[in-house]
């Protein structure tokens, strides 16, 4: 299998008046061709910042180190001009909030054709034709007429479809979806996920799916990567990880999902405590304060991500849960 | 009702996009005061710039029989005559050419410079932004009248100088407004999305940021035109503006003010036209602000 994205030792820090914040602390992962990689974690776990670093979209005070190879070429630290040859063309991104991701003053046509004219050197009319095809593909009815409409005339779900269509226009090899369904209501969520699955199957591109919704992961992803306090704590295939979580945090996450098939009125499980301050991470394991299995070694020594079975790895001192 | 046949697609209305600008135009057109203001402005502009073709007297025609006489409708002296026997009404129209031109040209100049400068500073941010805005602060601190006197000393009394002087001061405000807008817009997700799809910085500024700033800018522009007209009047009042026989609303009011006790009509005519024009401009500005209010989006 060819690797689309190869990330090694990626570290992202933010310089703030209160000191350095380590948002991502040396992560390592690959995404293969045609694969969906789910990235889960709670707010502030660094899951979005990994991909912001990769896309060169970090805030001004952010700084990324390490190596990111896209199809074998290093793309971390490229200047804007060189990066613009990759992003939008071979690697695109869709964002969380479809309500604000489209420019309210430009018609959908002008926003969609922009990328094609820019990257593929198409004429405006040729680009518009492609845009209509893509809108039809994401199941927008009357795509031809809708093309000339403005974002405020679309509903949230439709806008997210437009965003997806825009991201796919140049036929990217990797699509980064940063919480693509968080801002949508549940029925629309299902439609959008269905759409993504279908498109992924047709086009054969790789998807990095960032979310905090384990249900979305279960439905879409092939492999999962669980993030906590800027580090990967567990990695594995969806089936293995959901059936038999091997990191206490993953276990906690799965337990804190509400289930419909619970017969008794049981209380919903939660993970007690707060995620640690990223400016001042505790010694040893960053999860130890909230971990029910913590022991002395967790205080003194930081667990590293190590493989323990075929295709699975975790960062925990416990041999097994 | 039974024989109503449903044609396929009968329920589908022809979909046509309506931009936010079209929406704003619609709201503006429903505002009566603003539309009235716009109509008055257009009429004043037509009268001023069409004055040479209306078959009126020339602005320097002297009538020796009617020096300092009050309005006389029979002979067509609507605003009376001045101390040289010239028709004040005609002079008001010709003066309007100067005042309106200064108002519009200076505002457009400040709009272009201010928008590009402000958007660039706000978008680049950081040190560049700091340096660019400190330059603006420095220019702000130069006293305006001192600046005008300096220009007249070096270049003599020249009409173009008024444009330069007023434009040079007004773009500073515009730059600050646009910069502020840009700072809030550049963190919006659609700008991030544009970055993510590999659009160059310059294209992001011109295509995504500036159109989104235009609402407040247009409103500010309509409120700047009266300020500029008043400033020009002030400079002319001080004797550094237009020269005889040319006039502007400012010089006419100044002349009239000298003779206020004996010939009040000399100040009343041009003064009223100036006031009505400024009022109309303010109504239009107000209407635009309501029409473009971001809260209605």
Image (cartoon, coloured by chain):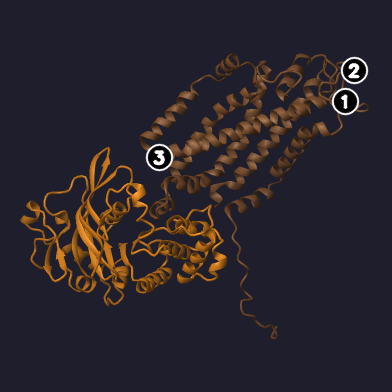
Chain colours: A orange, B brown
Indicate the secondary structure of the residue bearing disc 3.
helix
Residue drawn at x 65%, y 52% as measured from the top left: B26
Query: Which subunit holds the residue at mark 3?
Result: B
Q: Which residue is mark 3?
A: B124
Q: Marks 1 and 2, Cα distance to the nearest angstrom?
A: 10 Å
Residue A161 in the image, given as x and y percentages of width and height: 45, 65
Query: Which subunit holds the residue at mark 2?
Result: B
Q: Which residue is mark 1?
A: B77
Q: Marks 2 and 3, Cα distance to the nearest angstrom?
A: 64 Å
Q: Earlier in the sequence, mark 1 or mark 2?
A: 2
Q: Are marks 1 and 3 in contact (CB under 8 Å)?
A: no
Query: Which subunit holds the residue at mark 1?
Result: B
Q: Residues within 10 Å of mark 1 (few under 14, many from 20)?
A: some
Q: Earlier in the sequence, mark 1 or mark 3?
A: 1
> Could you tell me how many numbered marks the image carries?
3
Q: Which residue is mark 2?
A: B66
Do the residues at pointers 1 and 3 share their chain? yes
Left/right placement of residue A98 relative to residue B111 reads left
Q: Are marks 1 and 2 in contact (CB under 8 Å)?
A: yes
Residue drawn at x 25%, y 39% as measured from the top left: A18
Do the residues at pointers 1 and 2 share their chain? yes
Q: Is residue B97 above or below residue B152?
A: below
Q: Residues within 10 Å of mark 3 (few under 14, many from 20)?
A: some
Residue B34 occupies which quadrant of the picture?
Answer: top right
Residue A209 in the image, given as x and y percentages of width and height: 31, 64
Quadrant of the image for the N terminus of chain B? bottom right
Residue B117 in the image, given as x and y percentages of width and height: 48, 35
């Amino acid at each position: 299998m060819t690797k689309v994205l190869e990330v090694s030792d990626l570290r992202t820090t933010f310089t703030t008046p209160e000191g350095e914040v380590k948002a991502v602390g040396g992560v390592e992962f690959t995404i293969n061709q045609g694969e969906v990689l789910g990235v889960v974690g709670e707010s502030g776990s660094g899951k979005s910042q990994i991909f912001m670093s990769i896309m060169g979209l970090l805030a001004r005070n952010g700084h990324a180190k390490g190596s990111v190879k896209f199809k074998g070429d290093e793309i971390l630290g490229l200047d804007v001009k060189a990066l613009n040859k990759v992003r939008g063309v071979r690697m695109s991104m869709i964002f969380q909030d479809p309500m604000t991701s489209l420019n309210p003053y430009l018609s959908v046509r002008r926003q969609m054709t922009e990328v094609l004219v820019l990257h593929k050197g198409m004429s405006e009319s040729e680009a518009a034709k492609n845009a209509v095809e893509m809108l039809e593909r994401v199941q927008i009815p009357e795509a031809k007429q809708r093309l000339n409409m403005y974002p405020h005339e679309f509903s949230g779900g439709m806008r997210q479809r437009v965003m997806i269509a825009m991201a796919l226009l140049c036929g990217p090899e990797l699509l980064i979806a940063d919480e693509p369904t968080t801002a949508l209501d549940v029925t629309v969520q299902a439609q959008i996920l269905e759409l993504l699955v279908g498109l992924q199957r047709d086009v054969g591109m790789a998807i990095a799916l960032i979310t905090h919704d384990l249900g979305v992961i279960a439905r879409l992803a092939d492999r999962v990567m669980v993030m906590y306090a800027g580090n990967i704590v567990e990695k594995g295939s969806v089936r293995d990880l959901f059936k038999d979580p091997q990191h206490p945090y993953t276990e906690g996450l799965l337990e804190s999902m509400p289930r419909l098939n619970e017969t008794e009125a049981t209380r919903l499980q939660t993970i007690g405590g707060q995620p640690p301050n990223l400016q001042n991470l505790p010694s040893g394991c960053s999860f130890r304060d909230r971990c029910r299995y913590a022991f002395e070694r967790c205080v003194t020594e930081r667990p590293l991500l190590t493989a323990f079975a075929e295709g699975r790895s975790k960062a925990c001192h416990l041999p097994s849960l | 009702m039974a024989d109503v046949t449903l044609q396929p697609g009968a329920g589908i209305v022809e979909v046509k996009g309506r931009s936010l600008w079209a929406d704003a135009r619609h709201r503006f057109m429903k505002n009566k005061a603003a539309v009235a203001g716009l109509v008055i402005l257009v009429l004043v502009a037509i009268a001023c710039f069409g004055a040479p073709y209306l078959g009126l007297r020339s602005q320097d025609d002297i009538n020796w029989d009617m020096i300092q006489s009050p309005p006389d409708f029979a002979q067509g002296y609507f605003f009376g005559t001045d101390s040289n026997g010239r028709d004040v009404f005609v002079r008001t129209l010709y003066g309007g050419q100067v005042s309106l031109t200064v108002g519009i040209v200076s505002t457009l100049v400040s709009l272009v410079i201010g928008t590009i400068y402000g958007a660039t500073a706000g978008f680049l941010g950081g040190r560049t932004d700091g340096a660019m805005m400190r330059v603006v602060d420095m220019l702000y601190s130069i006293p305006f009248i001192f600046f005008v006197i300096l220009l007249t000393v070096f270049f003599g009394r020249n009409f173009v100088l008024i444009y330069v002087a007023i434009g040079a001061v007004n773009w500073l405000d515009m730059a600050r407004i646009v910069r502020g807008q840009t700072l809030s817009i550049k963190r919006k997700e659609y700008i991030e999305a544009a970055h993510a799809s590999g659009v160059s910085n310059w294209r992001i500024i011109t295509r995504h940021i500036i159109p989104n700033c235009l609402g407040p800018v247009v409103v500010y522009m309509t409120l700047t035109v009266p300020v500029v007209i008043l400033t020009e009047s002030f400079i002319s009042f001080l004797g550094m503006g237009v020269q005889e026989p040319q006039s502007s609303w400012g010089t006419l009011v100044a002349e009239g003010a000298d003779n206020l006790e004996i010939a009040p009509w000399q100040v009343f005519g041009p003064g009223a036209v100036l006031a009505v024009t400024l009022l109309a401009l303010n109504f239009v500005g107000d209407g635009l602000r309501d029409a473009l209010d971001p809260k209605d989006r």
